[in-house]
Each structure stands twice: as C-alpha cells, then as structure tokens.
Image (cartoon, rainbow, N blue to C red):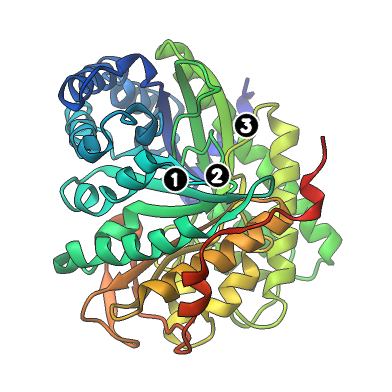
C-alpha cells in the first residue's frame, strides 16, 4: 500500500508528467455461450458481456476519483470468436455485431477478441472466419480483431500470412471514407500473448479464469522527466533511473488492478507496464530516446537506446509486482507518438528502421499509414518479415499497418483521439509476389525444440 510520500509523488507524476492507467481491461470467457447456431450464440454472448461488464466503467471511474490517477480506457477482451463460432463460421459476424452492441451498452471504449489463432495451420472454419473480418470491422465501432500467424514453437503459417495481406487491404477499402480506419482495429501477431490488455490485440485466453482484470500502465512522460534531471549521467545511471521510475509506475498499476478485481468480482490477472505514448507533447517514447542523446529518433543509436529502455522497464516492473505480463516494455506506434510523427514528417525514420527497432521493443510495426495502392502481397511480406523477427527472437511481434485508399506518400491522415495522425510512409516498390504465393509453412527455428 502507498505511504504518504508515495501518494504525493504519484500525484506529482499525474499532474506534471502524464502518468495514467492507460486501460483497465476485463477478460471474459465466452465458452459457456456456445449454442447450436449463430443467432442464439450471439444472444448469449451479448447477455454475458453485459452482465459481467456492467460495472467496469463505474468501478474504473470510482477508482480514478479515489486515487487521483486517470484511467483513460475501459475495455473488454473475450475468447477468440473463431473458436466459439467454429460450427457456423460464415455467420461469425453476427457474434461480432452482438459484441459491438454489448460494448456500447456497458459504455467501454473497445472490445477485443474477434480473433483467430492460426499459427500452425488454418482449418476450414478458421479460413471462413478470417474472411468475415473486413465486413465485421467495417460495420462495428468498438470491436477489434487480431490474428496470430506464427510462433517460435510452430513457425510461420505463410498461407495465413498471404490471406491476411488480402484481408488488411480489403478492410482498408471497406472503410475508405475514413482513410482505412478499420485497419487500426486489426493487428497480425507472431507469438501473441493471452493476457495483453491493449487493443487491438487483446483476447481472453483459454487457460484463463472465467473473468480476469488486466491493467495497462503508461508513463513515457514520467520516464522522460526523470532523465531530464540527469543530463550528464552515464548510461548505467540512465538505465538504473529508468528501472526505478518503472518500479514507481508499476506500483500504481498494481494498486488499481488489485482494487478493480476485488470490486468487479474477478481474478487479478497482470499489470502490463508498457510505455504507450499518446499524440500529446510530453507523452512520447521517441522523446525518451532523444533525451538520452539522439538528435532525432531514427538515427544511428536508436535501436541500442530502445533496447536499454525496454530492458530497464521490464526489470523495474518485475521488482514492483509479481504479476507483470502482457507486452510490458515500450511501444513505438507512429501515429500515436508526437515525436515519432515529426520524425516521419521530416524523413528521419523509415519502415526499415522501425522494423529494426521492433527487434528490441514490446511489439512491432504499429499504426503506420502506407499508400492506398500498396499491394496485398507487399502487406503480406511486411507481416512475414515482422513475424520472422518474433519467431527467431522468441518474442511477440505484430503488424498494424493502414493502407489509406486514395492517399500517397506525403499526404496526411488524421484518425483522431489516441489514434493520432501521421504522414503516409513509403514502402518498397520491388514486389514479393512470388515469395508470398509459395505458401506453406516457414519451419520453426532450431531453438524451438526445448522439451
């Protein structure tokens, strides 16, 4: 429990350094909702989410008021929908629409779990489910989708990678009037984790309790502020300062997570200490890297500093809570980070450099706007590259790119709110069609055989 000094310090971090609880996410099992047809299953899903999640917004708002820590988002994640609709995959969109209505009814920001796990192979019902994603995302507001196409244990399912390139492009075209916004709710993973509270990738794992609470804490501004106080320190001191700051931030998350779980009659899952930025100035992961000594994020040295930051954040978080999980580390979404946006605008950072950075950060290529005429095979090749990094390095990687119909390099898109804005970034013009058409499975690396 916090003492008087901890409370005062936390209040200072909230008021001056943009500390917040980025999300309280309730995970809900939908396995008991399976019925003989889509209509009855959708009704059971709606009733379950409304019943279990009816107090999540009220509880989060109450905790925010009591402890003086902003809780920005209230979310729900559910069992991957492809599993509960396996008997009627063509009608899975009915369950998706029911989930979106339930999200609206209980007043949450997003609901994740319109998802499929196809890392080792794609069953017939899974392929049919995947083809419902563009329509479902185009016709819902709060629903998010994720697909896991690879793992360090199984390799990369390149048939699924090929299909996801087509699905991403189709989703963009079906939401063209909003600059492809549907793709901001769709992420493709390698090594997806079950306790991730962040969207668009959250889903409720099969091995979890019926109802759990996972909390995501974010504090890029707090870390940047701490580093400003030691402008001449060596890198050992920098890493130690980040670690100590992460410890303080995680304790705030631990407190909120424990209390939220108790009040919502759910299991406490994990605290995800991810430095997730927002478009607000003073709340940027890229600014942390620049504070350490870069003229601009993207220049030589960026990957090394990001590796140090990610490691120190994890070490500090683990010291503060025995239930750290999710994707804890640092996110590098382009459109959601003001200094990343400016670097992209000025040509200081490219997709190639972002890919290198994903070797050492929390997730992967995130919220990157690309030309609307980018081919499906190029998108698939981007997914394959990122999945390979995750597979070989035994870490979670992901791709959330947004082809913006009618837009070209240099144009701008504005997605609004936390999703931010950014310029369209170039992709390589040389194709990878033959590679993607080969299909099959990229085998798992040799270090996967550990049993």
Q: Counting residues from the N terminus, which is met first, the one under dot 2 or under dot 3?
A: 2
The 10 Å Cα crowd at callout 3, few under 14, some 14 to 19, many 20 or more, is: many
Residue 152 in sight: yes
Residue 192's tag is 2
Residue labelled with disc 3: 251
Question: For this view, does 232 lie left or right of residue 23?
Answer: right
Residue 200 in sight: no
Q: Check the image and report above or below for 297 versus 32.
A: below
**Which residue is at a point 59% across and 45% down the rendered structure image?**
327
Whole-Å distance between the Cαs marked 3 and 1? Answer: 24 Å
Give the label, 2 or 3, closer to the camera: 2
Point out residue 302 in the picture as x, y percentages from the top left corner.
Answer: 67, 74
Point out residue 35 in the picture as x, y percentages from the top left corner.
Answer: 26, 17
Q: Counting residues from the N terminus, which is met first, the one under dot 3 or under dot 1?
A: 1
Element at label 1: loop
Residue labelled with disc 1: 201
- Residue 248 picture quarter: top right
Question: For this view, does 369 lie left or right of residue 269?
Answer: left
**Which residue is at a point 74% across and 51% down the rendered structure image?**
312
Q: Check the image and report above or below for 366 versus 375.
A: above
- Residue 341 picture quarter: bottom left
The 10 Å Cα crowd at callout 2, few under 14, some 14 to 19, many 20 or more, is: many
Question: For this view, does 396 lie left or right of residue 177?
Answer: right
């Amino acid at each position: 429990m916090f003492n008087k000094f901890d409370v005062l310090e936390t209040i200072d971090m909230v008021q001056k350094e943009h500390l917040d609880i980025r999300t309280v996410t309730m995970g809900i099992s939908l396995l008991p909702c399976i019925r003989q047809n889509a209509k009855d299953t959708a009704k059971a899903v709606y009733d379950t989410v409304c019943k279990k999640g009816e107090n999540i917004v009220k509880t989060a708002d109450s905790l925010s008021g009591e402890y003086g820590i902003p809780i920005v988002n209230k979310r729900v994640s559910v069992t991957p929908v492809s599993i509960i609709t396996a008997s009627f995959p063509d009608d899975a969109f009915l369950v998706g629409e029911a989930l979106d209505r339930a999200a609206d009814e209980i007043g949450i920001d997003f609901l994740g779990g319109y998802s499929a796990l196809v890392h080792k192979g794609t069953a017939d019902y899974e392929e049919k489910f995947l083809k419902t994603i563009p329509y479902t995302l185009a016709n819902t507001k709060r629903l998010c989708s994720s697909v896991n196409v690879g793992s360090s244990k199984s390799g990369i399912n390149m048939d699924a990678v090929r299909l996801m390139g087509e699905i991403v492009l189709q989703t963009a075209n079906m939401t063209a009037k909003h600059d492809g916004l549907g793709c901001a709710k769709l992420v493709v993973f390698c090594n997806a984790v079950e306790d991730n509270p962040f969207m668009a990738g959250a889903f409720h794992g099969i091995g979890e309790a019926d109802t759990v609470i996972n909390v995501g804490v974010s504090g890029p501004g707090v870390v940047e502020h701490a580093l400003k106080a030691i402008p001449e320190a060596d890198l050992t001191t920098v890493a130690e300062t980040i670690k100590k700051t992460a410890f303080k931030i995680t304790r705030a998350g631990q407190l909120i997570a424990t209390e939220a779980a108790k009040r919502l009659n759910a299991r406490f899952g994990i605290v995800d200490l991810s430095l997730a930025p927002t478009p607000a100035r003073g709340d940027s992961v890229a600014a942390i890297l620049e504070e350490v000594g870069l003229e601009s994020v993207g220049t030589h040295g960026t990957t090394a500093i990001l590796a140090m930051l990610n490691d120190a954040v994890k070490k500090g978080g683990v010291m503060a809570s025995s239930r750290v999980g999710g994707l804890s580390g640092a996110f590098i979404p382009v459109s959601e980070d003001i200094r990343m946006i400016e670097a992209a605008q000025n040509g200081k950072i490219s997709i190639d450099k972002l890919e290198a950075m994903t070797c050492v950060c929390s997730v992967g290529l995130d919220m990157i706007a690309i030309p609307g005429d980018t081919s499906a095979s190029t998108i698939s090749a981007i997914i394959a590259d990122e999945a390979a990094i995750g597979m070989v390095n035994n870490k979670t990687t992901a791709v959330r790119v947004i082809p913006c119909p009618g837009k070209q390099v240099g144009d701008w898109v504005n997605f609004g709110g936390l999703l931010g804005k950014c310029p369209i970034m170039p992709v390589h013009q040389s194709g990878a069609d033959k590679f993607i058409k080969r299909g099959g499975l990229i085998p798992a690396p040799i270090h996967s055989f550990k049993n």
